[in-house]
Image: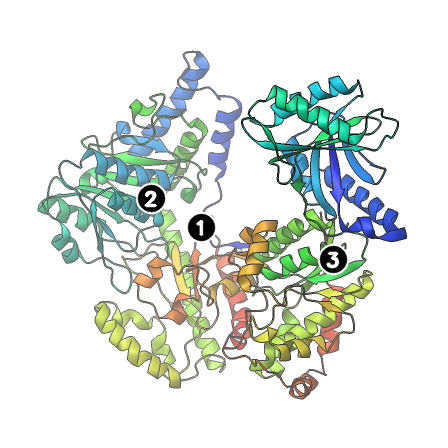
Amino acid sequence: MFKCFLIKYGEIGIKGKNRHLFEDALVRQICRALRRVDGKFYVYKEQGRIYVDCEALYDYDEVIDSLSKVFGIVGICPVMKTEDRGLEELGTEVIDFLENVYDIHSQTFKVVTRRAKKSYPVESMEVNAYLGHRILEAFPGMKVDVHDPEILLHVEIREKIFIYSKIIPGPGGMPVGTNGKAMLLLSGGIDSPVAGYMISKRGVEIDAVYFHAPPYTSERAKEKVVDLARIVASYSGPVNLHVVNFTDIQLYIYDKCPHDELTIIMRRYMMKIAEHFARQSGSMALITGESLGQVASQTIQSLAATNEVCTMPVFRPLIGFDKQEIIDVSEKIGTYETSILPFEDCCTIFVAKHPVTKPNLNAIRRSEQKLNEKIDELVKTAIETTEVIRVE
Amino acid sequence: MEAYLDNSATTRCSESVRDVVVRTMMEDYGNPSSKHQKGLDAEHYLRDARETIARTMKVNEKEIFFTSGGTESNNWALIGAAMANRRTGMHLITTAVEHAAVLMPMQYLKEQGFSVTYLPVDGRGLINLSDLEAAIREDTILVSVMYVNNEVGTVEPVEEAARLIKKKNPRTLFHVDAIQAYGKFSIYPKRTGIDMLSVSGHKIHGPKGIGFLYINEKVKIHPLILGGGQQKGMRSGTDNVPGAAGLAAAAKDAYEHLEENVEYLQKLRGRMLDGLRALNERLTDDGTGGADSGSGAFLEGRSEDRRASSSERKLREGTGSARAGQQRMPVIVINSGEDEHSAPHIVSAAFPGIRSEVLLHALEERGICVSAGSACTSNKKLPVSTVLKELHLRPELLESTLRFSFSRLTTEEEIDYCLKTLEELLPVLRRYVRH
């Protein structure tokens, strides 16, 4: 019965003169999301609203599922669209609608009419009163409650008349493409995909970099990261995943530097390489899944030490999250199941029993001096041999 | 170059198997239950397959039932026989080192009210016959022992076990999981006193998705899969004709040349073991391993412990770890043997200091396929192999064990290539260890 969806968007409605840019981006993102769904869809803007018309057979759940992954959407309303055939006929259609959508017994309701077409002969308040009367007549068990109704029935009078009552929540945020691009340091863990999701939610396109360390990390671990990137991409749009072979750099650091500083020094090189690819691909920031104090490399001192090597802003959207809060989001966005598959990632393979938790920046720099002989060459090789996988 | 040394995981199909599978899929694709000629042709394949397999074990073809593979055979044998005989008794016996396809059904039966005794094993994985004798009771209805251990290749004393069981309690049924043994040993269930025997097709160059269960005609057993009444109502489901024909072709290949095959496998195993020993010597001399006089004794160092009880062994391990503080571990420790208690196609070895997963992937990068003897990582995400644990290996051996397994299609060049690659990899990998 629903041949149309009304898309509600919140924040972008207040963007002043840039508003159309945000709306156009949202339309584009909706089109992209629906490309994966069977059916013919027509997405358009009209009088400050975005609509999706469905012109062929489609699967309702599939459409809702796709739309609820589009950032910028606050609510999705399945709409019954009807021609204006007079007020009496409208009353009959409203009753049909309620019968179809609800199991009517004794719910409370309220009718809200918006008369966008001012040439319509009856005023909104009168339409409300008339429809309320017809509903009470048809369903004697129902009652009006104007403050907290169980069913809030919207009737919008435009060129056509729109009837809807359900609002399925969307993810919120801003449409991807309205806030530039950033490079996500993606591992196989729980945190980094969530971090990518959260930044993308603010309208940011995502590229990603993964540090692969064969034979210490397996092909399956890499596949898992591709799978995670694919889930992030279902929200953010296509992700260019840079797979960097990090083994030689890691082993070289292992050979030359104190082992308790291994993780910090390694992460400094990861940031440097990630920043290189960010510049190359037009990203303007880095994203990590770090959460303050979670592990030795995420203390305030360690973060300062890893942050020091890059000039781009580093977004750490999970910085104040507890582990459980991160897990909750990862379950919601569907990355948790994949994240917990037990493959080793490159950060843990040589981790010292007691890594430094309060690294001294001068000491770290001194240790890095020992790498001077070969490290530039190794970084260069790692960058040159990086494999880029486009994940959609 | 490539080397496939993971034949205990699965094997490549032989050409004779492929040919008969294709023929029964493309030409003689009938359903044996159909009444027309195509059905009859298919039935002939099935009958021939059953006959061929029965002949390899000198049993009656009526005693061969096709299943979807080793796991189903084990499940059926245990659950089907336990349920059919539960009025006689509720006691079952198995070993601590069985495959999950035996341990899990046992666990299930335990939940159904049966009691299960798990026989301990010694340092190389062998059960003790006196333990078995002591465990058999008046109400013991079933004993299940594997023929060849899938992780280290230990050959259990099934013939002696069978004699013992029948002597102690003639009513007790004896099931043998022969999935790693069929095709490598002459197995005569009737003469031996084995009542049920599980076999899988893809371990002997046959197709996946097919196996069989030998059930002595006197055994009381319930079917697990009910339906159209195929295989005398004991295992319903449209007959897997390509599978059965393929499995029979594989069984025929295996048993027509059994002696030469086994001899060849032993030769491969010897080459591998000699190579590993020599490699250990060389790497130790290089100073990359434990360059101390004690390291030679470390190689197969548990042999002295093998018959020791587990408490004694733990005691020694305690002193052993203190000793390890002064002495470094050897480069290679061989877990499997070379005598009559060792399967000809499996070599298990540990490379202390290198996690098995890492060495596995390093070998894989050079085209060599092996299995990790134990799927354990130091961050404890993965379960430690129960079998290796039962062998009381020290932790550093547990998490660094690889299994090399051969078949008659394995070549000496593959072994040599693997040894050569190990020689290149080990010194490098040993330098980088987790602290």
Q: Tag on residue B7?
A: 1
Instruction: Kindly state the secondary structure of the residue where label 2 is placed.
Output: loop
**Badge 3 density bin: few <14, some 14–19, many ≥20, Cα 10 Å:** many
Quarter of the rendering occupied by the N terminus of chain A: top right
Left or right: B267 as drawn, with respect to A114: left
Instruction: Kindly state the secondary structure of the residue where label 3 is placed.
Output: strand
Left or right: A191 as drawn, with respect to B307: right
The residues tagged by marks 3 and 1 sit, at their Cα atoms, a distance apart of 41 Å
The residue nearer to you, when weighing A49 against A141, is A141
The residue that disc 3 covers is A207
In the image, what residue occupies the spot 22% across and 38% down? Answer: B82
The residue that disc 2 covers is B182
Residue projecting furthest to the top? B36
Q: Are the residues tagged 3 and 1 within 8 Å (C-beta)?
A: no
Instruction: Kindly state the secondary structure of the residue where label 1 is placed.
Output: loop
The residue nearer to you, when weighing A16 against B184, is A16
**Badge 2 density bin: few <14, some 14–19, many ≥20, Cα 10 Å:** many
